[in-house]
Amino acid sequence: MTIFKEYFNYDGIGLAELIKLKEVSIEDVLETAIDSLSKSNSKLNFITTEMYDFARKSIKDIDLNNAPFAGVPMLLKDMDSSLAGYPMMQGSKYLKNTKQNFSNVLTDRFISSGALICAKSAAPEFGLMVTTEPSEFGPTKNPWDQTRTPGGSSGGSASAVASRSVPIAHASDGGGSIRIPAACCGLVGLKPTRGRISFAPSHGDKWGGFTHSGVVTRTIRDTAHMYDHIFGSEIGDPYKIDYVKGSLVSNLNLPEKNLKIGFVTKNYIEGTELNDNASKAMYFNASACEKLGHNVEELKLNYDAVTLARAFVIILTSHASQMFNELKELVGRPYKNSEIETGTRMFDYLGRTFKGSDYTWARYYTQKVSRDVELQMKSYDAVIMPVISSEPAKLDTIRPSKSDEIINKVIMQLRLGWLFNIPSIRDSILDGLAPKSLWFAPGCMLQNITGQPAMSLPTYFTEESLPVGVQFVGDYGSEAKLLNLGQQLENEYRWDLKKPNI
């Protein structure tokens, strides 16, 4: 094997171009990636399943003429898109080494892009945390500072891409899980519009339509090219939105001028205020857009974030319970308490406690807020909003505390779920949880609910060289406009040249 020393200087499209021009071999690119993955993973812990032989065997099936990422190494997140014959453990001991018997459409599209899946990337248990610290697999570390979180739930993917071991990795986003890791790790993280990417054949939607699939990358063009390849609905998908093939890529070279950009500084849940670094990141991005010639003005969004968080929890926990019904069939038995983290079991318990009327109210309420928020944003080409409320948090500060775990155990052991059937008590408890659970990522849940595209960009780094991404939110179906603006900012600030010291 020949180590391709310049590997770390190229994004995915750049590597694919070299391979197609035969300036470097696929084998040398892949073996360089494997060498880097092995070394970086030993420090950062972003891999759950090595698939190096699978990647090597996949080389023979690549269509060099029609594969935009021919020979480009990537990771597949260990949840939300299965690959036949391999486990999808979702950060849980319960699913350890339980192999899948089918591949999702999205996995097949990644493969048809020419990308070589080298490994499964780490995630928190069932994607329920905004940090990647599952009990069974241990914490994944941030390449920019190994004492800090890479975010979650796509933290393994983000850590691997930020370490430059691979240029691109699968990610998914049910409450910020593409954007939060991108913001923590200095990456581009675009959550697409609801309906852009299919969950077929396993699901119509995830978490009531809140979950979206995608990628994290180091460059705008990698994001544009991969989404151009994987966008598209399947028969039976509950949400569909038309996409014109090639439009994301072609639009990058036509910089849009004089965009009207809203700037939202206020957080809506008391106790989730931005710290100094996060505030600086927001104002930096507003100023950056003005310097590019765009019109930036303050936007005061009006919605009840606390009640919205309550509805979100009801929907999320209800789907968590249904997930365990499905997993029981896959594994062949219910889970044992020792196989599932306490916080996750509490999600399941609450999901079984809420009534159908609770779920229906939550769906109707989130849909009402979606309509109201989209109307308020309608006159803007993009809206700048926070992703994270501070620089990447220290490890072990976002996971549930010991006291929280004790309270959860008491509620379940004493079967106190009936309290949640009393509306006043239920609402009081859920409303109290909002600032505690959302303090680190207060600005992400909204776009999962509305279904709007939202993209975290790494324009700002602190004096300690820590990334603090902010998001640009667009109108339904406006990914091309967001990526166009992102390309303008990347050309100006060249975050793709920044490298962590691992």
Image: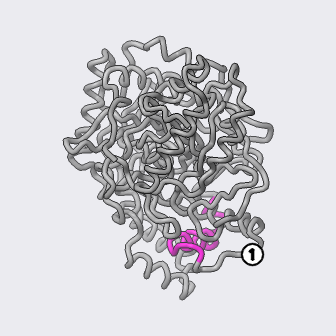
Residue found at x 55% / y 51%: 121
Asked whether residue 479 appears in the rendered view, the answer is: no
Residue 356 shown left or right of residue 435 in the figure: right
Report which quarter residue 43 is drawn in.
bottom left
Give the residue at the far front of this rendering: 1
Please check the rendered image and state whether residue 352 is part of the magenta-colored stretch, yes or no: yes
Residue found at x 54% / y 83%: 416
Q: Quadrant of the N terminus?
A: top right
Asked whether residue 467 appears in the rendered view, the answer is: yes
Which of the two residues, 345 or 162, is positioned nearer the viewer here?
162
Residue 240 shown left or right of residue 471 in the figure: right
Q: Position of residue 379 (x, y in %)?
A: 44, 24
Q: Position of residue 63 (x, y in %)?
A: 72, 26
Residue 235 shown left or right of residue 254 in the figure: right
Q: Amino acid at mark 1?
A: Arg
For the residue carrying disc 1, how many other residues have a C-alpha within 10 Å: few (<14), some (14-19), or many (20+)? Answer: few
Stretch of the chain drawn in magenta: 339-359
Which of the two residues, 207 or 45, is positioned nearer the viewer here?
45
